[in-house]
Structure formats: structure tokens, C-alpha cells
Amino acid sequence: MRIGPPGLRIGIVTGLQEEAAALRAVRPDLAILCHGVGPRRARRAAEALADDGATVLVSAGIAGGLDPVRRTGDVVLATRILAPDGAVYPTDAALTARWTAAAAAAGLAVHGGDVAGSDRVVPGVDTKMALYAISGAAIVDMESHAVGAVAAARGLPVLVLRAVSDGVRAAIPRAVIGAVARDGSRRPWVAVGGLARRPWQLRAVLTLGRHAAEARTALAAVLAALPGDPAP
């Protein structure tokens, strides 16, 4: 099954290096690029992929859950990207439907819903619940709105494939805030220092790490089941 026209080239943007590594392990045939966390670096990655000939841009990785029905490991193919400046970027409906069907054919569930873009980490339960009340979005991340903006500027279709890591009722422990470097790699010494100051957060940090790993595994399983670029 082909997800688009002949010659389609899929370019995938991630925010974390470990996301990129997990996805490359199952799909070495696709262009997967990580310039780091946040909208500015995601924009650079999306522009680089488009400059290199990508004809579809995809924002992929883990995400925070906003909709209370979404659980850790749920994979979302977003319907729309809601940018923090009020811009709305619809994802490509035909490609999203084809990817959903391909996942279902492999026995894997993907869910719909909007993704809310944020320019900064949304760590707290109250903040997540407030964002859900305002937006109605299923998930939140820091890269999709930048990828959507590049796709709109270049006239390219955009998709969002994200797996829920921390649900709406799960806060990100303060001990690990800042434990990701600008290039999207982990800075474990920051987490160690944070836990030295807040040792009571150890269980929450371990749970967060386990849930992130579950989300990456679910995401990679879905991506592995999807069709890629047509053969030249």
C-alpha cells in the first residue's frame, strides 16, 4: 500500500536523539533528523529535510497527554496542530487515513485528536488540565507546530505521529527539568544533581523514564508497520 504519490519522500523530525535512534532502528529507509528540543530547532530540522527533497514532513516522538482518556503508550496520529500563537495546521487527511489503516492491518491501534503546540515544557498536572480545557487537544509537544509552520510555508503535507509518555495526571518531576541538552541528547548529571536536591522524587523519575521507554517502543512499532517511500 502506498501512502502517497510516486516519488514520495518522507522526512521525520524528532526532538530527542533517543527518539531518532529508536525510529532509525526500525526504519533505516526513512530520513529521520533531530536538531534538538523545541520549536526553533524543529524548524531547522524540517527546513533541512525539505531542502533535501522531502515531500512530506512528519513530527514524531513522545508527547504529553492532555485528554484524560489517553494513556501511556497510546499512539496518536493528530488531526490538527494547534500552535500557541493561534495558528492551526491541518494534517494531511488522506495520508493520515492511510497510515491509520496500515497500523490497523498490523493489529496496532492509533488514535485521532489534535496536538497542542507549546514553546516550553508543560510539566504540571494543573497546567496540562488547563491546556486541555482551552484546546481540547489530545496531546502536547514542543516541535509539531514548528514542523507544521514549515510544511505550510513550503506547501507540503504534514503528519504528526506521537506516543503518549506522561499522561495528563502525571507531572514531570522538577529534578529532571533541564536534563536534556540543546541537541536533544540526555544530560544524566543534571538529573543526578536534581535528585540529590530532591531525593523524594526518585520514584517519579523512574516512573517517567519507564513510561518514556514504553512510549518510544509503541511509536517504533507503529512506524515499523507503515509503508514508506515508493521504490525508485
Image (tube, rainbow, N blue to C red):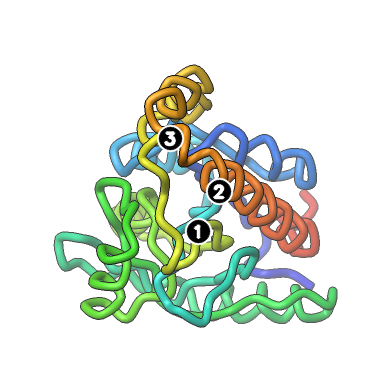
Residue holding disc 3: 176
Three-letter code for the amino acid on which mark 3 is drawn: Val
Q: Are marks 3 and 1 in contact (CB under 8 Å)?
A: no
Going 23% across and 72% down the picture, which residue do you hit? 130
Does any portion of residue 57 appear in the rendered image?
Answer: no
Q: Is the C-beta separation of discs 3 and 2 under 8 Å? A: yes
To which residue does mark 2 refer?
208
Question: Residue 75's image quarter?
Answer: bottom right
Whichever of labels 3 and 1 marks the residue nearer the N terminus, that label is 1
- The reply to whether residue 11 is in sight is yes
- Amino acid type for the residue under numbered disc 2: Leu
Residue situated in front as seen by the camera: 155 or 219: 219
Left or right of 146 in this view: 179 = right
Residues at marks 3 and 2, CA–CA distance in whole angstroms: 10 Å
Q: Residue at x 73, y 53 (%)?
A: 217
| Mark positioned earlier in the residue sequence (3 or 2) | 3
The tag earlier along the polypeptide, 1 or 2, is: 1
Q: Position of residue 218 (x, y in %)?
A: 71, 60
Which type of secondary structure does the marked residue at label 2 adopt?
A: helix
Q: CA distance from mark 1 to mark 2?
A: 7 Å
Spot occupied by residue 224 in the image (x, y as percentages of width and height): 78, 56
Asked if labels 2 and 1 touch by Cβ distance under 8 angstroms, the answer is yes
Q: Residue at x 75, y 64 (%)?
A: 226
Q: Which residue is mark 1?
A: 166
Please say if 231 is above or below 19. Answer: below
